[in-house]
Image (spheres, rainbow, N blue to C red):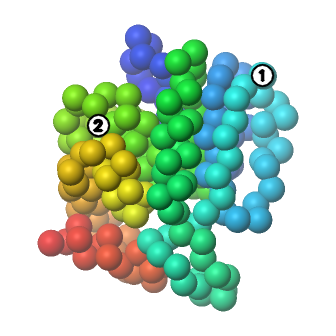
Amino acid sequence: MATSPDPALTLHTVCGLEELSGHGEAGISHVLSLLDPGTPEPVAFEGYGVHRRTTLRFHDCLGPGTDKHGTTLVPPEREDVAAILAFGGDLRDASHVLVHCHYGLSRSTAALLMLFAQGEPETEAGALVARLHALREPAWPNARMIAFADAALGRGGELSEAVRRLHALQLTVRPHLADLLRGLGRGPEVEAALR
């Protein structure tokens, strides 16, 4: 579980599916669920109070293809990023925002970063990524999602560059991730981080 440490701001939580049940008493007002296609709505939400929820379904990948099980991958597209930003545009009365994906590491951290960037257009991308990293230390934001957000928010590639630096840091701390991510079809992120 990771929750924003600054009580003056809307609370932000980013997590994975297995952590959802631990947030039922946290006063969550808005939920962004990023699920694989075909994944049912998480049962854990039955334990939450009244909240607004937006659910999007796409795989955590960098483009079309198939995984090692032969599943056709549905990558995140510009329309998905537009839907995430529309969710962000409707947070005026939010008190506690929860963003989750399967593990709480890639799709959800990319989405939360774009919500930060949308809400604070004058804040430098590196500072936003540092905040995200402090909130969810093993974060590995999906580079495809961030590239679409960079364009949609007019950031000129600065979000992508800040995420590339975070990926490089993560590979320094967790060098085993390089082979794991390459095996999952995420080699372009690894190679960009190692440049």
- Give the residue at the far top of this rendering: 8
Looking at the image, is mark 1 or mark 2 earlier in the sequence? Answer: 1
Query: Is 112 located above or below residue 63 in the figure?
Result: above
> On the picture, is 33 further left or further right than 45?
left
Residue at label 2?
128
Mark 1–mark 2 Cα distance, whole angstroms, equals 29 Å
Query: Is 178 located above or below residue 93 in the figure?
Result: below
Q: Quadrant of the C terminus?
A: bottom left
Q: Quadrant of residue 144?
A: bottom left
Which residue is at a point 56% across and 46% down the rendered structure image? 83
Which residue is at a point 28% across and 65% down the rendered structure image? 171
Residue 90 visible in rendering: yes
Residue at label 1?
50
The residue lying toward the viewer, choosing from 149 and 131, is 149
Residue 170 visible in rendering: no
The image's mark for residue 18 is none
Q: Picture coordinates of residue 54 (x, y %)?
A: 67, 40
Q: Picture coordinates of residue 59 (x, y %)?
A: 59, 66
The residue lying toward the viewer, choosing from 145 and 101, is 145
Mark 2 crowdedness (10 Å alpha carbons): few <14, some 14-19, many ≥20: many
Which residue is at a point 50% across and 62% down the rendered structure image? 77
> On the picture, is 128 further left or further right than 119?
left
The residue lying toward the viewer, choosing from 89 and 100, is 89
Residue type of the residue flagged with mark 2: Leu
- Give the residue at the far left of this rendering: 195
Q: Quadrant of residue 80?
A: bottom right
Q: Picture coordinates of residue 89 (x, y %)?
A: 50, 30
Mark 1 crowdedness (10 Å alpha carbons): few <14, some 14-19, many ≥20: few
Q: Picture coordinates of residue 44 (x, y %)?
A: 79, 40
Query: Is 174 located above or below residue 3 in the figure?
Result: below
